Image (cartoon, grey):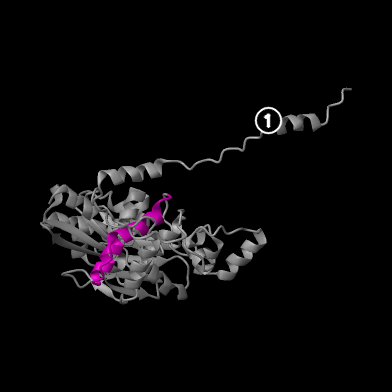
């Protein structure tokens, strides 16, 4: 391919003064109406479900801090690229509650205590013992005792009603791992071991030995912002939105998604595309009123005596005016002839003499009328009759 062909193909990525924002909004909102409300399973696993489809798109562009299904993709260093070591790292990540270790439990109403029998094999695999479990139980007005695989928790207050509440609190206590990470799946992807989790806590995961801090990521843009910065948060928005759309077979140009991601993060923070974010911070009063809360914006603008300059697209459409985009972004100035010009006649070969005569005719200026000469006698009479000037 020659250079001219390459230039011609990449020269016009978009037309001058094209309304790119409107096109981006149309290209994303229209496919989003075709999305389904469903969840997706990780390939090869049946335990983890991730929210996708329309609910996930809403989470991304509404910039929600609490996700329905937060996940992490944990990559391991070269030293931990084996099934056994990857499993050990996964065990250190997964949250372990007391109810995961309990095989059976009994409420002793006589002594007002709860007796729980623990799974000794699981405790051995997780490198736990009864002393570590006792230290993890931090409840007020409670006496904890244990030996072997048996745990006894007694209430210091004589209250039978609160004994069942105490049991629930006891079973939900965090013993080991990272809080919030309820499920962990170890997979081999592209020749390396990767850990997929349900639940996220990026700061604590990166402190675990064997975790690669340069590639580990999560689907929560706010966690990525806190740990890695705004560029990582922007890339998370682009990646998650593109993945969600592609999963449903919707082909949207990535440049439109990048435009929205830039708009959400260019201030250094993450802003939602909504009335409490970008749409609510527009300069135009009519543009804000056109989105949501129409009365609120119009009343507040009238009280403050605000003025709308009608410099955008939305407000000009509302006022039935030409929008400042495309040909409406500039004025055309030029001389328009009153009569249409006659069609040019084909030139015919003329002899040299006739051509020279025509050129002389054209070049010859128009004769200027000479002033009429006044006769000498009349001029003398005019001098005599003229009134003489009086001297002061």
Name above or below for residue 1 compared with residue 165.
above
Please state the horizontal and vertical placement of residue 170, each as a whole percent of the image: 37, 67
Mark 1: which secondary structure? helix
- 375 left or right of 12? right
Front residue (pair 98, 145): 98
Name above or below for residue 234 compared with residue 58.
above
Res. 179 image quadrant:
bottom left
- The residue segment tinted magenta is 240-267
Report whether residue 38 is seen: yes
- 157 left or right of 5? right
Res. 150 image quadrant:
bottom left
Instruction: Return the residue at label 1.
Output: 376
Report whether residue 133 is seen: no
- Number of labelled discs? 1
Residue 372 part of the magenta segment: no
Please state the horizontal and vertical placement of residue 275, each as a whole percent of the image: 49, 64
């Amino acid at each position: 391919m020659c250079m001219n062909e390459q230039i011609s193909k990449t020269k016009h990525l978009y037309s001058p003064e094209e309304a790119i924002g409107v096109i981006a909004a149309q290209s994303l909102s229209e496919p989003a109406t075709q999305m389904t409300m469903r969840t997706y399973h990780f390939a090869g696993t049946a335990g983890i479900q991730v929210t996708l489809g329309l609910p996930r798109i809403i989470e991304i562009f509404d910039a929600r801090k609490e996700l329905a299904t937060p996940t992490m993709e944990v990559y391991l260093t070269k030293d931990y690229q084996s099934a056994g070591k990857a499993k050990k790292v996964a065990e250190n990540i997964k949250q372990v509650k007391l109810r995961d270790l309990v095989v059976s439990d009994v409420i002793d109403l006589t002594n007002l205590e709860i007796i729980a029998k623990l799974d000794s094999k699981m405790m051995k695999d997780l490198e736990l013992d009864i002393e570590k479990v006792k230290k993890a139980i931090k409840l007020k007005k409670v006496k904890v005792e244990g030996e072997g695989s048996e745990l006894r928790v007694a209430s210091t207050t004589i209250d039978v009603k609160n004994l069942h509440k105490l049991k629930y609190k006891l079973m939900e206590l965090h013993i080991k791992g990272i809080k919030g990470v309820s499920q962990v799946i170890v997979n081999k992807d592209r020749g390396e071991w990767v850990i997929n989790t349900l639940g996220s806590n990026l700061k604590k995961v990166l402190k675990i030995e064997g975790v690669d801090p340069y590639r580990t990521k999560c689907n929560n843009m706010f966690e990525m912002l806190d740990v890695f910065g705004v560029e990582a948060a922007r890339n998370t928005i682009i990646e998650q939105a593109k993945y969600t759309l592609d999963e449903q077979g919707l082909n949207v140009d990535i440049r439109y998604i990048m435009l929205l991601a830039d708009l959400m993060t260019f201030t250094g923070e993450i802003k939602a595309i909504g009335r409490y974010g970008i749409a609510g911070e527009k300069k135009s009063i009519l543009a804000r009123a056109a989105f949501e809360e129409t009365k609120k914006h119009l009343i507040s603008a009238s009280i403050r005596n605000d003025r709308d300059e009608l410099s955008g697209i939305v407000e000009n459409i509302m006022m039935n005016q030409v929008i400042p985009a495309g040909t409406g972004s500039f004025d055309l100035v030029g001389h328009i002839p009153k009569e249409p010009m006659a069609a040019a006649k084909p030139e015919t070969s003329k002899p040299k003499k006739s051509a020279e005569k025509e050129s002389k005719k054209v070049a010859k200026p128009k004769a200027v009328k000479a002033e009429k000469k006044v006769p000498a006698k009349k001029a003398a009479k005019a001098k005599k009759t003229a009134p003489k000037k009086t001297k002061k």
